[in-house]
Image (cartoon, coloured by chain):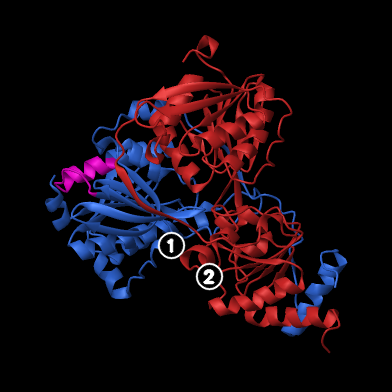
Chain colours: A red, B blue
Amino acid sequence: MATHQNGGSGGVLLFSENPETVGELLTLGRELASRLHRPLIVAAVGRNAQALLDEGLARGADEVLAVRDSQGDGIVPDESIATALCEAIRASAPAVVLVGATRTGAELAARTAQMLQIPCASSCVALEMDDAGNLSVDRRVYGGRFVSRQLLNIAPRMVTVPPKRFPRAEKVSELHGSIQELQVELPAPRIKTMSVNPRSHSQVDISKAEVIISAGRGVKKMEDLQLLEKLAKLLGGVLAGSRPLTGDVDWLPVDRRIGLSGQTVKPNLYIACGISGQIEHIVGMKGARTVVAINNDAKAPIHGEADYSVIGDLYEVVPALIQACEKAMGKVG
Amino acid sequence: MTAAGIASVPSILVCVKFVPDPAQLQAEPLTGRPDLKRSPFRISTFDENAIEAALQLAAEHGGRAVAMSLCAQLPPKDVVLKALAMGVAAVYLVKDEERLARDPLRVATVLAATARTIAARESLAQWDLVICGEASADEYNQQVGPRLAAALNLPAITYATGLTLLNGVLRAERAIEDRSETLEVNVPALVTVGTEINTARMPTVLQIMGAGRKPMVELTLAELTGLDIDQLKAFPAVEVLDVFSPPSARKQVTIKGESADEIAAELLRRLGTDGEVTL
């Protein structure tokens, strides 16, 4: 590979296994690449390589690095993506590496960074670049209650960014990006995939909802979600949940999960019912305009993230709220 | 190592981080920085699930689960005892008083050397299984597990929600955003787990009292086999500029009332005034 003079692009290399996230990283990546006056490069690796390549070119990448397994069908298996990314980083010598902080992305970034013996800043919610190209990033720590501001001052500066943090880049009217192919030799895979099951999907896209009623561990039984669903209907909103309800138990489909491992939402009104407010959750709902927290634990971190706190039992407060809404709408009483 | 040999007695290493309890951590009033000195410690949440997963596999196969932890200062004894009381056979504590291992690159490098050092002390050729929490409750980097796998050249299965071990083959259920997967790998391997995999046991008072008899071994970085401390110091690092409590843009108004009805009415009135609810 001799695509870049002086041994490196000095640009921005980005990767996600998810095409939509690539589109979002392109927005951030373009900003950084423009500051550096260097190219914006998408690494297209893995099963989705073609879709990632298409997304990259369509939304303004200067270059797509199409990484292919030198053996077999050329598709880099999941387990070897980190090795392939190492090669992509070596080949393009970028100043900045952006990876989408999905679960897969978090693992890949960490593994890749260790193989290259470089640091990586995870799940950055704000990034700032100075004139020397150094990156200052903000991350949430200690259950989301504190911000850690960190500096990456040696290239490649690797960061992961949560999905939905940035808007997807616009499609460009004229494709200008080039495609560079990179063949890599990969070790034999050790992990066998026995089966893959898509997780259940709901019909609702909570990331676009104006009003969200969100359920947490304080909800004791699956049937009790009907109560929150009723409140959601009255307020013209949708029902969502924190990780315990969408993972530890499957009371809600996983695409209704709000948080680091789920969706990032920006509704006008967010009512957190029985949610303690761990970092995992807070990251996903920080963008809400108005936040109401209903939780009987006065010390729950969610109260610190709320405009209006009700320190009380959701099993008393939510029915009262439903009644108050119905009353206000003139349906009862 | 033969598959049959592994199946009889698996050796399991759990990575544990002792952290200031985020739920009880307060900001220093003057600086807005976390008041780490006054916060009680706990076993990092997901690491409790990692311990539980290790204990369940060890119980089923008659193996031993040992824990290792890297710490700048020794954690309070009661939290270490809790890990022992849950059932791990020994806890190895690596003291890093100079805080050389202050970011995940260095942490994973030190833990890899620790894993090798403890294996030698326990007369093991290698660990069959290394189990880590998927992220720590304080820093939440989600990096150390996969990094440790890379440092030990182990295959990694992250975000596992179920584990079974049979004849040296680890079968894992894994859950990511849009799908679940069933994966198989020959041990040795590393897995990371979260709260989905199990409910961690709470040791009884008697178990905690009895745990004092189990080994709690302290090690220094200098005692770790194959750790190049000069190289560690030379690694590029993320520099922490500041840790602060962000000024809240929230109103933080507590709605009070004599009854749930009163509270509900007041909340609705406030939301109406803000223009969030029009009924």
Q: Secondary structure at mark 2?
A: loop
Q: In this view, which residue lies farthest toward the front?
A: A73
Occupied quadrant, residue B257: bottom right
Residue wearing tag 2: A251
Residue A34 percent location from the top left of the image: 69, 24
Instruction: Specify the quadrant that holds the N terminus of chain B.
Output: top left
Residue mark closest to the camera, 1 vs 2: 2
Residue B196 marker: 1
Tell me if residue A80 can be seen: yes
The answer to which of B42 and A101 lies nearer the viewer is A101
Toward the viewer: B51 or B33?
B51
* Count of numbered badges drawn on the protein: 2
- Which chain contains the residue that carries disc 1? B
Q: In terms of secondary structure, where does tag 1 sit?
A: helix
Task: Identify the residue at horizontal 60%, vertical 75% (top origin).
Answer: A225
Q: Would residue B38 be found to the left or right of residue B107 on screen?
A: right
Q: Nearer the viewer, residue B217 or B264?
A: B264
Is residue B67 highlighted in magenta?
no
Residue positioned 55% across, 64% down in the render: A253
Mark drawn on residue B255: none
Magenta-tinted stretch: B114-128
Amino acid type at circle 1 is Glu
In terms of depth relative to the viewer, which is nearer, A48 or A330?
A48
Taking A239 as reference, is B115 left or right? left
Vertical placement of residue B276 versus A31, above or below? below
| Left or right: where B132 falls relative to B237 | left
Q: Position of residue A162 (x, y in %)?
A: 59, 45
Outermost residue, bottom direction? A333
Answer whether residue A220 is visible to the viewer in this image.
Answer: no
Tell me the residue at 66%/59% (across/down). Answer: A206
Q: CA–CA distance between discs 1 and 2?
A: 13 Å
